[in-house]
């Protein structure tokens, strides 16, 4: 049986901030869901199932939060699924929802991902003591900084590359009203002079801690025909994982990431991602991961990712814009960060990204990773159905 083409017909995200004290977790997810339904001009009654995702429960200390969110998401009496793949969960959640539509199990699915970090402390939540895991030295940055240093040694990249990425993404965020960080006085010099947190990662090269949620409405061909706005069509999607630690693991360019991208490109018929993809929303929580992922995903040859960044190609007006929304460096509700990458890619090909719209965007990549660079999820969306 052929797969049903999957269309994104509604997208909604909350206002992101360090602390959304005006809403509970239920209010947060409902805010995003209502905006997605309004975009699709649908109601709760039109939704056949709900797929929800978030990062580890211990971030907020609320175990199995999906159990009390059914009412807020119009899911009482309907199938509701929970997905969890660490930081990549937002992307994985969207892919589970897409597969329900593609397999014709459900016709219209609402998918939501969230995090309310103000009710937790993710920094120390990621710093569990020995013997439960290896010491991460205060948060994810302590874990990933050695991998960034390995990338610099491997490629000979100059120390300024990370600051270029941060400066670009924070300027892009100024064009995105939903972004958490709006640093109107941002300059390259301020980024370069910000305190060093985990050598070589500076304060301004790190993601914030955000409260926020993202939602999408996915449907098939019949639902897309009724949509009030042009949909984004899913041309390919995949998930891959590998252990956090094993002999021979390449932390600079994980095998799972390369395999996941290759599968998505195969599904979408992409043979030259650098030329055939118009915009990429990549999961870049620390600025150096832009050039690292450009190589991992096949946009640049090994050792050449930093040159692509330094050339200006990844700027909003470059020939391969990366994170025109401001990316994870500007907005990071961990459980929703991956779905935001997927949703922002869909907004681009729908022509509905507002001031950070990339002119002529026809195909866009959404990318998420999580854990110790062990979970990957990606999708490629276009402005035309996958069969033509």
Image (spheres, rainbow, N blue to C red):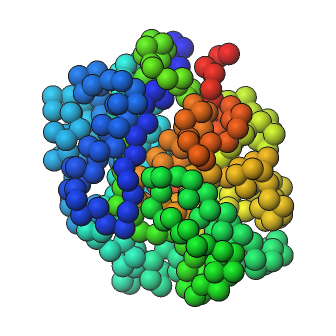
Q: Nearer the viewer, residue 97 or 185?
A: 185
Query: Which residue occupies 55% across, 73% down?
Result: 206
Residue 139 percent across, percent down from the top left: 45, 77
Residue 354 percent across, percent down from the top left: 56, 42
Apparent side of residue 237 relative to residue 273 in the rendered image (left or right):
left
Q: Nearer the viewer, residue 362 or 351?
A: 351
Q: Nearer the viewer, residue 148 or 20?
A: 20
Q: Nearer the viewer, residue 110 or 203?
A: 203
**Image-quadrant location for residue 151:** bottom right
Q: Is residue 48 visible?
A: no
The relative height of residue 232 versus residue 225 in the rendered view (above or below) is below
Residue 252 percent across, percent down from the top left: 68, 67
Q: Is residue 12 visible?
A: yes
Q: How many marks?
A: 0
The relative height of residue 332 versus residue 297 in the rendered view (above or below) is below
**Image-quadrant location for residue 198:** bottom right
**Image-quadrant location for residue 150:** bottom right
The relative height of residue 337 versus residue 346 in the rendered view (above or below) is below
Query: Which residue occupies 48% across, 48% down?
Result: 340
Residue 112 percent across, percent down from the top left: 35, 42
Apparent side of residue 326 relative to residue 155 in the rendered image (left or right):
left
């Amino acid at each position: 049986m052929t797969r049903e083409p999957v269309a994104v017909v509604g997208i909604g995200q909350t206002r992101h901030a360090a602390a959304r004290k005006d809403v509970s977790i239920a209010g947060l997810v409902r805010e995003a869901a209502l905006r997605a339904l309004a975009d699709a001009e649908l109601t709760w009654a039109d939704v056949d199932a709900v797929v929800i995702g978030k990062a580890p429960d211990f971030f907020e200390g609320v175990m199995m939060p999906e159990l009390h969110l059914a009412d807020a998401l119009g899911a009482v009496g309907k199938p509701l699924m929970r997905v969890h793949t660490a930081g990549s969960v937002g992307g994985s959640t969207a892919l589970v929802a897409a597969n329900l539509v593609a397999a014709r199990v459900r016709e219209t699915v609402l998918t939501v991902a969230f995090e309310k970090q103000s009710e937790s402390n993710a920094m120390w939540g990621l710093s569990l003591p020995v013997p439960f895991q290896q010491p991460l030295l205060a948060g994810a940055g302590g874990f990933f900084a050695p991998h960034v240093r390995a990338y610099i040694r491997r490629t000979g990249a100059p120390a300024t590359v990370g600051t270029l990425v941060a400066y670009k993404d924070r300027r892009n965020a100024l064009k995105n009203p939903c972004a958490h960080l709006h640093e109107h006085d941002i300059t390259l010099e301020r980024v370069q002079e910000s305190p060093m947190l985990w050598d070589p990662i500076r304060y301004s090269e790190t993601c914030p801690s955000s409260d926020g949620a993202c939602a999408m409405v996915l449907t098939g061909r019949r639902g897309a025909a009724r949509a009030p706005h042009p949909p984004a069509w899913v041309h390919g999607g995949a998930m891959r994982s590998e252990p956090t630690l094993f002999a021979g693991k390449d932390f600079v360019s994980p095998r799972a990431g390369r395999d996941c991208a290759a599968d998505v490109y195969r599904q979408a018929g992409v043979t030259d991602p650098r030329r055939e993809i118009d915009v990429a929303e990549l999961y870049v929580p620390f600025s150096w991961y832009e050039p690292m992922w450009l190589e991992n995903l096949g946009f640049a040859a090994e050792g050449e990712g930093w040159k692509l960044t330094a050339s200006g190609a990844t700027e909003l007006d470059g020939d391969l814009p990366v994170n025109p929304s401001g990316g994870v460096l500007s907005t990071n509700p961990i459980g929703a960060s991956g779905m935001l990458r997927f949703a922002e890619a869909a907004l681009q090909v729908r022509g509905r990204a507002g001031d950070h719209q990339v002119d002529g965007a026809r195909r866009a990549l959404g990318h998420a990773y999580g854990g110790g660079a062990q979970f990957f999820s990606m999708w490629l969306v276009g402005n035309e159905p996958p069969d033509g």
